[in-house]
Image (cartoon, grey):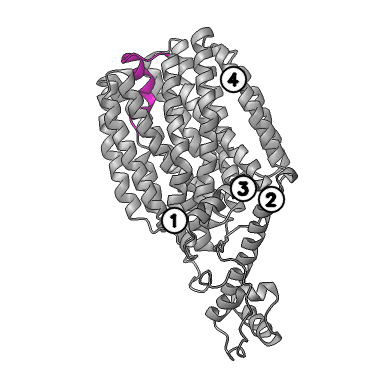
Amino acid sequence: MSAVLRPLGAARTPPAPGGLAPRLRPLRVGAALQGFMLWVPVEKLFQTQIGFDAATIAVMAAAYAAVVPLLEVPSGILADRWSRSGILMVSSAAAAASALLGGLSHNVATYIAAAMILGVYFAMNSGTLDSVVYDTVIEETGSSELYERWIGRVRITESAAFTTSALAGGLLAGWTSPRLTYFLTIPFVLTSIFAFSRFREPRLHRAAEPLALRRHVVTTVRAMTGIPRVRRVLLLAALTALLSQAIFEFGPLWLVALHTPAAAYGPYWALLVATLGAGGYLATRLPLGSGSFALAVGAILTAAPILLVTTHSVVAVAATQTVLLLTLAVTAIHAGRLLHDAVPSSIRAGVSSGAGTFSWVLFLPFSLGFGAVARAHGVYTAGWIFAATSVALAVSVVLSARAIRSTPAELQAIADEPPFDHARPVLTPPPADLACRDLVRRVSDYLDGELPTNWRASIADHLGACAGCTNYLEQIRQTVVLLEQIDLNHCQPSAT
């Protein structure tokens, strides 16, 4: 584990007041432009115009749900190894290509191809944006305490774009045609590429010496599968994402079943997407980890779907879906914080993408089952699938409240070197003024208790005066604990 990285705090300067705001501004602008999709509120109307029904809509959803899991974790690992802002730019390009092909579609098959390209957008975007925000907060402040506030502000910005585009898309579709909304979306999404290129990406995940690709993949997968606490948070995040996606995907079918006028779809969709911003606002003001929060969320998740499948009022349907999505938006931020706290920065985007992969794996049978039941018995009967999923999520939320939030896991290195089995060279006496680089070279021996007394005393003196190296040493300790826990659970699967 020797020579792993520079001290995290050695080059860090105290953050300037308000430093996070200007640094995150390009990211927020890019996210807003990326979310300005004029076609989304009228998608179901356009689909019915080119031959879709409830069953083929479910097939389309299943098609991109099959694409996303294949790309999500690999894209997250690529983001960790290459560039997270670069992955966001690739996702924008995929969204633009999907809108172009969708606007050119005149049949079900072509539109499904467009939906599969949209799956590339989902895969590249999932887990990347929130990982960037988390690491930027850590890099600027030295703590993750402001994560909910800033991811909430990003969600508010996104929500404002979603809401504006929903209203504008509905009006444009009414004045012209739904098809035009696809083509007018493309310039906004492409402009987001420029905004992301202006963002100064955090370097926490690049601080360590690069891992071999195989070791990186294995570590990412074992973190997701080998640690019970991470598995529980992944389940919570995946169920939250599944239910949110299901409401956005199938919620408008309630309006179709109730023969709602086309003019109502824009305001209805604007109301739904506004919950993302409202959830971001509430997440900074609610006790997200408390038992009272968990019980309140569990009660809403249990009761709201029952109202959804029993009411035939358009207003009640819209209100119920809005309350559900608002609750899910807050829960998603809570789950994201727990997940980011639990893993190192070097694998953060990969593990966060894993939660998205899990949600899409669950969404595939969900969408096919919902479509089959809706086609045979109607959307209200199929709505009981919503209710069952929502109850499962309520149980997961309550159980998560019992978990203890870990300290921020800014673990900057996953050592890939085997233990030394040869005789160690005799050390020269420590320098009179031990430097940070000297501590980095000897950190493994220091933690293993294998340094002479004079070296240990010099390092202790240095740690007393250097906050950066103290932070670095704690990160290495946490890395060792994480790897030991992964290896323990891997070697003794029955214990989990």
Residue 338: image tag: 3
As shown in the figure, which amino acid type bears the numbered disc 3?
A: Leu
Left or right position of 398 against 152: right
* Secondary element at image label 1: helix
* Secondary element at image label 2: helix
* Secondary element at image label 4: helix
**In this view of the protein, which residue sits in the foreground, 298 or 489?**
489
Determine the CA span between mark 2 and mark 1.
27 Å
What is the span of residues highlighted in magenta in the rendered image? 37-53
Determine the CA span between mark 1 and mark 4.
39 Å
Q: Earlier in the sequence, mark 1 or mark 4?
A: 1
**In this view of the protein, which residue sits in the foreground, 113 or 140?**
113
Mark 4 is surrounded, within 10 Å at the Cα level, by few (under 14), some (14 to 19) or many (20 or more) other residues, namely: some
Determine the CA span between mark 2 and mark 3.
25 Å
Label 4 sits on residue: 385
Q: Percent from the top left, x then y, of residue 186? A: 27, 36
Residue 81: image tag: 1
Residues at marks 1 and 3 touching, judged by CB atoms closer than 8 Å: no
Residue 45, magenta (yes or no)? yes
Q: Earlier in the sequence, mark 4 or mark 3?
A: 3
